[in-house]
Image (tube, grey):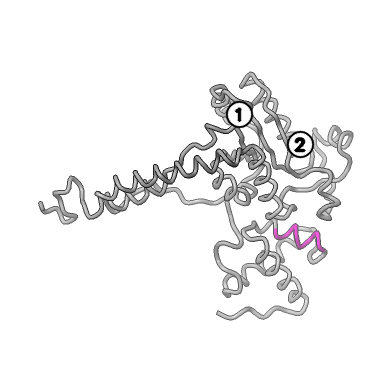
Amino acid sequence: MTAPTFRAKNQTLQAQAVAVLRAERPMTLRALYYRLASAGHLPATDAGYDRLKRLTKRLRESGAVPITGWIVDRVRSTLKPSSWTGLADFGDTVRHAYRKDLWADMPHHVEVFVEKDAIAGTVQPVTAEYDVALNVIRGDVSISFAGEIAKLWERVEKPIVAYYLGDYDPSGMGIEEELRDKLTRYGGGVPHWVRLGVVEADFAAFDLFPLPVKASARSAAFVARYGTRCAEVDALPPAELRGRVRAAIESHIDQGRWQRLKRVEELERGVLLDFVGGWRGKTALGTVSPEGGAR
């Protein structure tokens, strides 16, 4: 495929979009929009977002930008039960899936909370790498959501540290406050809570485009405490979000002990590999072929 030809007014935007994606992938379309709008390449309007959406569609369909991997959509998903072609296939899954709970020997219990699915997709590679729970709020904090987490926390016998990523606006701050309140009330304890972003300093550090305060029941309290500037967490560079989450998690890791446990994990994975290796080439009970005939 060849790169599409854009009109003159879109050529600069196309170049900037590809440059940002190449440097910061994976990222959501909305995160890309905020990066380009903050840099002055797009108007911070619905029309600007729609323009970028059309442009990136052409870029991906032409092959100038990969269809997958650079721009991600974490809201839509496909649901299907797991299945395998046989025991050998299942054995491969088992041996690659094994992970030792390294946090059992660390001094803190660490979890990450994000306000929306889009940010979960951005930071999930980091939380998965370190085997840290990533909790997605998706709007108002339900009793069931907070209650299930609080119930799990009751069994944790070490200090709990929670890191939060959310919008800097009345809704985002309200959701965070409600979440903290419910987790504290339902769990009977107060976790150490840290907002990783958006924070006040981010406006200057990343030249965030300030959004107006939307009228709501929470607006007056927000303005009194934080002022009249708002920003969505999507506006922060994905690499910055991942870096903050990584630094936060690593601050609770005893690196010497962590590396020793990783070596134990590898040895245990080797034992499991030897065990499931005997499954290769076998079918159900080792006697029945896929066609139904006995062997």
Tell me the residue that label 2 is attached to. 173
- Point out residue 86 in the picture as x, y percentages from the top left corner: 27, 51
Q: Secondary structure at mark 2?
A: helix
- N-term mark: 2 or 1: 1
Tell me what residue is drawn at x 68 percent, y 37 percent. 163
Q: Quadrant of the N terminus?
A: bottom right
Q: Nearer the viewer, residue 279 or 172?
A: 279
Magenta stretch: includes residue 36: yes
Disc ID at residue 159 = none
* Extreme residue in the left direction: 294
Amino acid found under the numbered disc labelled 1: Ala
Q: Which residues are magenta?
A: 32-39
Q: Position of residue 289 (x, y in %)?
A: 16, 54
Residue matched to label 1: 146
Q: Nearer the viewer, residue 35 or 58?
A: 35
Q: Residue at x 55, y 47 (%)?
A: 129
| Type of the residue with mark 2 | Met
- The reply to whether callout 2 and callout 1 are in contact (CB within 8 Å) is no
Left or right: residue 98 versus residue 52 is left
In front: 84, or 209? Answer: 84
**Residue at horizontal 35%, vertical 51%?**
92
Examine the residues drawn in magenta and state their main secondary structure: helix
Please state if 199 lies on the left or on the right of 263 as rendered.
right
Within 10 Å of disc 2 (Cα), the crowding (few <14, some 14-19, many 20+) is: some
Instruction: Residue 179 in the image: state x and y as whole percent.
Output: 67, 30
Question: In the picture shown, does residue 118 fall above or below 189?
Answer: below
SS at mark 1?
Answer: helix
Residue at the spot x=52%, y=37% of the render?
Answer: 102
Residue 146 quadrant: top right
Say left or right for 83 vs 217.
left
